Image (tube, coloured by chain):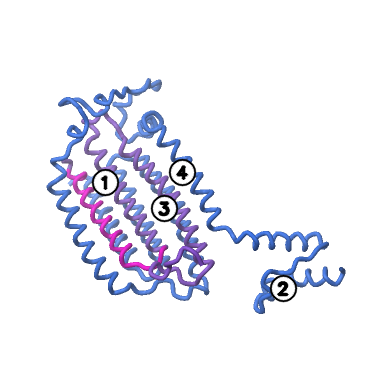
Chain colours: A purple, B blue
Amino acid sequence: MIPLVSNSLILSAVLFTIGVVGVMIHRHPVMIFMCVELMLNAANLSLVAFNKQHYAENWHAVDGQVYAFMVIAIAAAEVAVGLAIIVSLFKRRARVDVDEVNQLRN
Amino acid sequence: MSGESIIWWVMAALAVAAAAGMVTSKNPVHSALWLVVNFIGLAMIYLVLSAPMLFAVQLIVYAGAIMVLFLFVVWFFMSPRARQFMRPPLRSQLLFGGVLSVLLLGLLAYAAFTGGSNMSFGELLPAEPGQSVNEAMNLTRPEDTASTPLEELPMGHPRQVGTFMFSYHVLPFTLTSLVLLAALLGALMVARDELEEGIGNFKRYAAVVTRKRVIRPLKPAAGAATAAGADAEVTAKAEGQA
């Protein structure tokens, strides 16, 4: 394996784990969203690293980078919807911590 | 150590440090800015990994657009109504988060060090030895009208990425536009004001503008006089005229 590629996979795992830690120890949904973004970026990094690894043998294909583009687009959509949900939640109640929001209605 | 390696190590350290800073920071604005630093480090790593298009998109879309949205929402939450943005984590969160994260990191490290070398696309697809996945799937290269063949371009060249995106992946690309449209409409619908309230606001505004009909405010709250002072004044004047 190309050293930078395997190192990138390790880095991706580390960043993903930091994102998981953030999701699990935070209580505010905006912070949880930021950590989810970090996890998406870690996944993107591994996609790009695997693309680099299999570029020559795989007929000069850059599918991994294209998938990373798709992930970025979906992440943008997800952020817009998620932040809209959090804002509308905040309009109804002062506390939006994820351990206190436990009702879908009222 | 080559220049690429140096850049990679510096940016990897920066990205990990920024991620840790984001998770541990007490101030949400600092967290968002740390996340921007992390994105910049990752973008530089993309550059080292021969993905210059992704480098630019990462900077423009992620660090430029998505994080600005995050910052706006964070500032929205830091209004006086939200007294304390981040409360300390629950003890059970720390316990389960720590244990599960250590397990996950161990699993990922195990997979990265041992399992990865045993996996190959050849076992998943019926490819002959030495035959590429694209040949096995009967994918042929589209006609290239520009002078340089795609294989001779450096990896990650925008023309290469665009050719792949708009030939093999054109259906996912099109579906992405649908997803973005649905997200746009969904965000608008979710974050809008309540319907009656919105119509009431509109009618009151119309009354103020035309000075013909007056609709009473929905909430004649005590403390709202300062903010809606001008509005209420005009309303009262219109009532007097009527």
Mark 3 / mark 4, whichever is N-terminal:
3
- Location of mark 2 (residue): B229
Disc 3 + disc 2, Cβ < 8 Å: no
Chain letter of mark 3 equals B
Q: Residues within 10 Å of mark 3 (few under 14, many from 20)?
A: many
In the rendered structure, find residue A46 and report the number of the disc placed on it: 1
Q: What stretch of residues is rendered in magenta?
A: A3-29
Q: CA distance from mark 1 to mark 4?
A: 24 Å
User: Which secondary structure type mostly characterizes the magenta part of the structure?
Assistant: helix
Q: Residue at x 35, y 59 (%)?
A: A35
Chain letter of mark 1 equals A
Do pointers 1 and 4 mark residues of a single chain? no
Do pointers 3 and 4 mark residues of a single chain? yes
Q: CA distance from mark 4 to mark 2?
A: 43 Å
In the rendered structure, find residue B179 and report the number of the disc placed on it: 4
- Residue kind at label 4, given as amino acid type: Val
